[in-house]
Image (cartoon, rainbow, N blue to C red):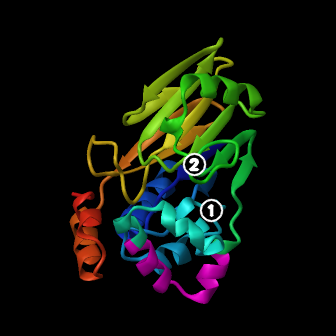
Amino acid sequence: MRVAVISDIHANMEALQEVLADIAQAGVDSIICLGDILGYGPNPEEAANLIRSLSIPTLMGNHELVLADPELLEWFNDPARESLLLSLRRIGRKTRDWLRGLDMRLVFEGALFVHGSPPDSLTRYLFDWTDVELESLFQRLEQRLCFVGHTHTPGAIAHDHGQIVHHRLKQGIFTLQGEAGYIISVGSVGQPRDGIDNSAKYVIWDRLRDTVEVRFVAYDAARTAEKIIAAGLPKEHARRLL
């Protein structure tokens, strides 16, 4: 079983289309999306429609959570709130209802999937946990492996014989060790912030081989940046892509 895990598309159709093309060539059995289809980018309706048309199991992200809890808008900084409000005006009722109904967690093939932090947080960043808190968290988790988005940066936290080990994942294959537990941050399709390059990022989990492969996918980021500016979205969301 090979599972592609994508997250944080943020209305970036150029990146999403290239990632889906790469997934098609990689030979996977399933795709799971960890949410944040909305925000930052110029094509929220198109991105949501593409994900929905492919019947990809999709979780709610913190940007989608605003549909269920409008007060959460105050949690975002000013540029993110501005872009999210514009995103919400660009989606239709059918898309709005679909996004509002997304689940907050998924267990698939023995692994846990959630947008922010396990067991089911949409808003807490993985890097906000102390090692003491992570030790307690791993002891409570029922699954050995958990995949999260939200940070926009590929990474892994391992729990092995009572030790917490942090890994910053680069392009290529990361082998899971023995009985260690892991939380894998899958990076971002539409707004990568890893500082390596501006490629779209996602991962493929190979359950049989016990590996996680980080995939870098080039796309026309300049085109997306132009569309962000043309749509009247905050210019800093365009600069982040370049």
Amino acid at the residue labelled 1: Met
Along the line of sight, the residue nearer the viewer: 28 or 80:
80
Along the line of sight, the residue nearer the viewer: 30 or 32:
32
Main secondary structure along the magenta-highlighted residues: helix
Question: Residue 210's spot in the image, x, y percent?
Answer: 61, 29
Using the image, determine if residue 31 lies above or below residue 164. Answer: below
Along the line of sight, the residue nearer the viewer: 159 or 215:
159
Quarter of the picture holding the C terminus: bottom left
Q: Quadrant of residue 67?
A: bottom right
In three-dimensional space, the C-alpha distance between marks 1 and 2, rounded to whole angstroms, equals 10 Å
Please provide the residue range marked out in magenta.
82-98
Q: Quadrant of residue 131?
A: top right
Residue identified by numbered label 2: 116
Question: Residue 236's spot in the image, x, y percent?
Answer: 25, 63
The residue positioned 50% from the left and 50% from the top of the image is 150
Residue identified by numbered label 1: 60
Camera sees residue 220: no
The residue positioned 66% from the left and 47% from the top of the image is 113
The residue positioned 60% from the left and 66% from the top of the image is 65
Amino acid at the residue labelled 2: Gly
On the rendered structure, is 235 left or right of 93?
left
Camera sees residue 13: yes
On the rendered structure, is 20 left or right of 124?
left
Using the image, determine if residue 176 lies above or below residue 229. Answer: above
The residue positioned 49% from the left and 80% from the top of the image is 88
On the rendered structure, is 71 left or right of 75?
right
